[in-house]
């Protein structure tokens, strides 16, 4: 279901669908001025993907950028 939601949204926005958590984490780091940690993000988004997604959602929500 989440993958289809991402595909639907990208189709409506007329953009490529890239549901890759690694790139999302990199964007969050850049947007909020966090230190880049390329290797750590690769490691975390592999076996710990659910944790990474929740952590990212928390960072976004804490900064008031969550679309509701």
Image (cartoon, helix red, strand yellow):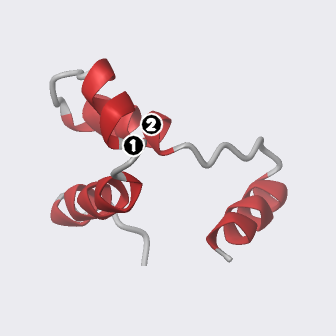
Q: Where is mark 2, residue-wise?
A: 22
Q: Is residue 52 above or below residue 24?
A: below
5 vs 63, nearest the viewer: 5
- The quadrant in which residue 38 appears is top left
62 displayed left or right of 42: left
Total number of numbered discs in the rendering: 2
50 vs 58, nearest the viewer: 50
Residue drawn 77% across the image and 44% down it: 15
Residue drawn 16% across the image and 63% down it: 62
**Residue at the extreme front:** 47
* Mark 1: secondary structure: loop
- Which of the marked residues, 2 or 1, is nearer the chain's N terminus? 2
| Mark 1 neighbour class, 10 Å CA radius: few under 14, some 14 to 19, many 20 or more | some
Q: Where is mark 1, residue-wise?
A: 45
Circle 2 or circle 1, nearest the eye: 1
* Mark 2: secondary structure: helix
34 displayed left or right of 11: left
Give how far across and how far down residue 16 sits, in percent: 77, 41
- Point out the image quarter for the N terminus: bottom right
Residue drawn 21% across the image and 56% down it: 59
Give how far across and how far down residue 21 sits, in percent: 47, 45
Cα–Cα gap, marks 2 and 1:
6 Å
Asked whether disc 2 touches disc 1, contact meaning CB atoms under 8 Å apart, the reply is yes
Give how far across and how far down residue 33 sits, in percent: 18, 29
44 vs 2, nearest the viewer: 44
- The quadrant in which residue 36 appears is top left
Q: Is residue 21 above or below residue 2?
A: above
- The quadrant in which residue 67 appears is bottom left
Residue drawn 84% across the image and 57% down it: 11
Give how far across and how far down residue 31 sits, in percent: 30, 35
| Mark 2 neighbour class, 10 Å CA radius: few under 14, some 14 to 19, many 20 or more | some
């Amino acid at each position: 279901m989440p993958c289809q939601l991402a595909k639907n949204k990208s189709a409506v926005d007329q953009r490529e669908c890239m549901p890759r958590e690694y790139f999302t984490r990199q964007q969050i780091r850049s947007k909020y001025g966090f230190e880049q940690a390329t290797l750590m993000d690769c490691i975390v988004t592999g076996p710990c993907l659910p944790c990474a997604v929740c952590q990212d959602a928390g960072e976004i929500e804490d900064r008031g950028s969550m679309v509701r």
